[in-house]
Amino acid sequence: MNRFDFTPYRRSTVGFDRLFDLLENQGRISTGDNYPPFNIERRTEDSYRITLAIAGFRPEDLDITAHQNLLVIQGRKREGADEGEMLHVGIANRGFERRFELADFVRVERADLADGLLVIDLVREVPEAMKPKKIAIGGQPALEVVSGRDQAAA
């Protein structure tokens, strides 16, 4: 059992309680169930894509819920066979629940199901008030938003 003690860090930081709680809870929650398999892809600086392999599920079998900082994907097993008697069942069709912790200002943009893959696109949208701003020296009242490209060039 790997358990980290974050107490020394909690004493010297302010406002990071959620981060430490998240790290501690991940250690307790990991059940080892890897179904369904998934990928997480960073597409651009502010967009991400989660892809789950869920062969055999239809859109009406899925429930996708976005809470404040949590994305929950649930698949419900269908009752009864669609056709004939099954002689071998090799395609998993059991129910599942996957949870993804989302950073602040990350929202679900869209979800699509095609060819047995559930694709969920996420976008991080930082409000204008939270973006860094350049402060003019010499009494200039104008502030301009600093973009990521301006910072990279500096």
Image (cartoon, rainbow, N blue to C red):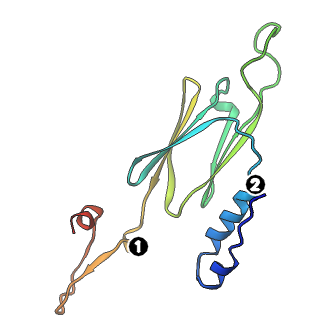
In this view, which residue lies farthest toward the front?
1
Q: Residue at x 64, y 75 (%)?
A: 17
Label 1 Cα crowd, 10 Å radius (few <14 / some 14-19 / many 20+): few
Q: Where is residue 46 in the image (x, y as percent from the top left)?
A: 40, 54
For numbered disc 2, what is the local secondary structure?
Answer: helix
Q: Residue at x 21, y 87 (%)?
A: 141
Choose between 12 and 61: the one closer to the eye.
Answer: 12
Label 2 Cα crowd, 10 Å radius (few <14 / some 14-19 / many 20+): few
Residue type marked 1: Met
For numbered disc 1, what is the local secondary structure?
Answer: helix
Residue at mark 2 to residue at mark 1: CA–CA distance: 32 Å
Q: Residue 29 carries which label?
A: 2
Disc on the earlier residue, 2 or 1 = 2
The correct choice, above or below, for 14 with respect to 109 in the image is: below
Q: Where is residue 72 in the image (x, y as percent from the top left)?
A: 66, 48
Say left or right for 104 vs 95.
left
Asked where in the image residue 76 lies, by quadrant, the reply is top right
Which residue lies under the disc numbered 1?
130
Asked where in the image residue 91 lies, by quadrant, the reply is top right
Say left or right for 42 vs 85.
left
- Tell me the quadrant of the picture where the N terminus can be found: bottom right
- Tell me the quadrant of the picture where the C terminus can be found: bottom left
Say left or right for 97 vs 117.
right
Choose between 11 and 121: the one closer to the eye.
Answer: 11
Residue type marked 2: Ile
Q: Where is residue 23 in the image (x, y as percent from the top left)?
A: 66, 63
Of tags 2 and 1, the one toward the viewer is 2
Q: Residue at x 55, y 23 (%)?
A: 115
